[in-house]
Amino acid sequence: MTARIDHLVTSGTFALDGGEWDVDNNVWIVGDDTEAIVIDAAHDAAAIEAALAGRTLRAIVCTHAHNDHIDAAPALADATGAPILLHPDDLPLWQQTHPDRTPDGTLADGQEITVAGTTLTVLHTPGHAPGAVCLYAPELGTVFTGDTLFQGGPGATGRSFSSFPTIIDSIRDRLLTLPGDTKVRTGHGDPTTIGAEAPQLDEWIKRGH
């Protein structure tokens, strides 16, 4: 049985550089009827645990460490026993939200995470955050992009720890090389495809997001 993708939207606050914004976050659950991983434990650990419906949680994978993507991770880990995985380059951001708790494991470019017989490959895609990663699951025809790539453009780079040239390089070199029909499941908002976004690269560069 191939893994399926379940989707949950949770709401809360994004805080960075002294500002706060109300946000809705996509939480992605990849697995089958017995086991799963959670991509970005945002805002509401109880709601995420309920969506797991008794399945064994193998890992809580953080696409990056902005607070709105990790604020519920420790509570979910405590409730399920699952390890929290984060790219080490995002530890400074993580520590802003969870100074007394460290992730349980690291993510690295090329690392493979297998759940329910399906493999997701970690792609290090810095720019929105230094340790930002995407997760590519070719068997599911999907890439989970966190806040690196959205419908209509790259993630924001106007705050601390971010870089517009770096995110453009990440998208060009790591994401737009994927098959055009690959579905892009984002950290916020609606999905898109690689093929829909690729022609817009030059326009994004001109706009200088």
Image: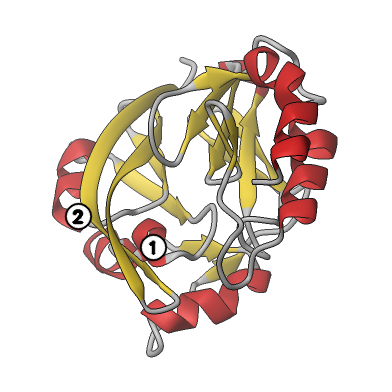
Quadrant for residue 208, please give it.
top right
Quadrant for residue 108, please give it.
bottom right
Q: Is residue 67 left or right of residue 166?
A: left
Q: Nearer the viewer, residue 199 or 179?
A: 199
- Toward the front, the furthest residue is 207
- Toward the bottom, the furthest residue is 100
Q: Amino acid at mark 1?
A: Ile
The residue that appears at 80% across and 28% down in the rendered structure is 202
Q: Residue 129: give x, y in percent of width and height.
A: 62, 62
Q: Nearer the viewer, residue 19 or 134?
A: 19
Q: Residue 61: give x, y in percent of width and height.
A: 49, 53
The residue that appears at 54% across and 59% down in the rendered structure is 64
Residue 146 to residue 75: above or below: above
Mark 1 or mark 2: whose residue is earlier in sequence: 2
Evaluate whether residue 102 shows in this view: no
What residue sits right under mark 1 in the picture? 70
Q: Is residue 66 left or right of residue 106?
A: left
For label 2, count other residues whose C-alpha is less than 10 Å away and answer few (under 14), some (14-19) or many (20+): some
Q: Which mark is residue 44?
A: 2
Residue 38 to residue 88: above or below: above
Q: Nearer the viewer, residue 41 or 192?
A: 192
Q: CA distance from mark 1 to mark 2?
A: 10 Å
For label 1, count other residues whose C-alpha is less than 10 Å away and answer few (under 14), some (14-19) or many (20+): many
Residue 176 to residue 182: above or below: below
Evaluate whether residue 177 shows in this view: yes
